[in-house]
Amino acid sequence: MIDAVVPDDVAPPQRPATRGHRIPIPMATSPKAATRLEEKQLSTENRLDVELRTEFGKGAARRVRRAGKVPAVVYGHGTDPIHITMPGHDTMMALKHANALLTLVIDGNEQLALAKDVQRDPIKPVIEHVDLVVVRKGEKVTVDVPVHTVGEAAAETVVNVESPTVQIEVEATNIPENIEVSIEGLEAGAQILAAGLTMPAGATLATDPESLVVNVTAMISQEALDAELAEAEAGIEQEEPAEEAEEAPAEAKAGAEADAEA
């Protein structure tokens, strides 16, 4: 999973206003103003103030987590790894979605980064460690993006998403949240391959084009399901007498051998 920094041309979703309050939304009066506004919003949304870490090891990591923070390491582009501490709650919110671009503020310097690996507690909603890779504006990265189906297939069909994610190559500052796949009106037997997906602007498919992404099958009727169950039960009943017949000669032979020894 990859998470990232301040995109230039992707505006974050506006947060809903709480009841009884109206949140003023600045309006752009020109394309350039809109771009500057988007950059400012993205910077605010994904900006994390982090601290350099001087203690390492499991004991040090546990102390960081007890303080409500997240241990992490930043590397890439030939730079030496930098061990940092990230704010726990803000990091959890920033990494809610895959491939979030982050702006790390380290000693007053900003660095774009994508979360390459996020280790989460299997029980508690806590991030235990994050591996971050350095990226630059305009640089292309290869990431796994979730597949999201839209629309409804024909009646009495089942839609199976065979590949929940697809791999694409895209600019680090323009990674889509998901790839939408329309299943509207598809009949049983319809299939969508990776090659049939519509890529976002500037993105190219990195997954095998022949990979099956969506498979639409006919829904099994209750009558067909009952027939399959009855057939399976009949098969079990036929196997039991055969097993008993095989056991009888073996028991008889064992009895005869016992009589002969006596």
Image (spheres, grey):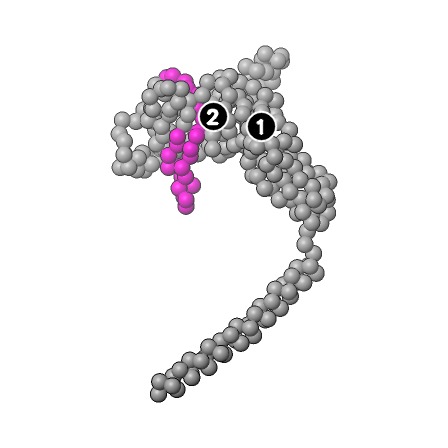
Task: First in sequence, mark 2 or 1: give its number.
Answer: 2
Q: Secondary structure at mark 1?
A: strand
Horizontal side of 114 relative to 186 (left or right) equals left
Q: Residue at x 37, y 17 (%)?
A: 108
Tell me if label 2 and label 1 are in contact, CB under 8 Å. Answer: no
Q: Quadrant of the C terminus?
A: bottom left
Query: Who's the residue at 63% across and 35% down the image?
Result: 193
Give me the C-alpha separation between circle 2 and circle 1. Answer: 20 Å
Disc 1: CA contacts within 10 A as few (<14), some (14-19) or many (>=20): some
For residue 205, the mark is 1
Residue 225: x, y in percent?
A: 66, 59
**In the figure, 238 relative to 15: above or below?**
below
- At a point 51% along the width and 29% down the height, the residue shown is 143
Magenta: main secondary structure equals: strand
Q: Can you tell which mark lies on residue 56?
A: none
The amino acid type, in three-letter code, at marker 2 is Ala
Residue 163 falls in image quadrant: top right
Please tell me whether mark 2 or mark 1 is closer to you in this view. Answer: 1
Quarter of the figure with residue 187: top right
- Check disc 2: other Cα within 10 Å, few if <14, some if 14-19, many if 20+: many
- Left or right of 14? Residue 222 is right
Q: Amino acid at mark 1?
A: Leu
| Quadrant in the rendering for residue 109 | top left
Q: Is 72 located above or below residue 228 in the figure?
A: above
> Would you say residue 125 sits in the magenta stretch?
yes
Q: Position of residue 96 (x, y in %)?
A: 49, 34
State the SS at label 2.
loop
Question: Can see residue 51?
Answer: no
- Taking depth in this image into account, of 225 and 130 the one nearest to the observer is 225
**Which residue is identified by label 2?**
4
In this view of the protein, which residue sits in the foreground, 69 or 261?
261
Q: Which residues are magenta?
A: 108-131
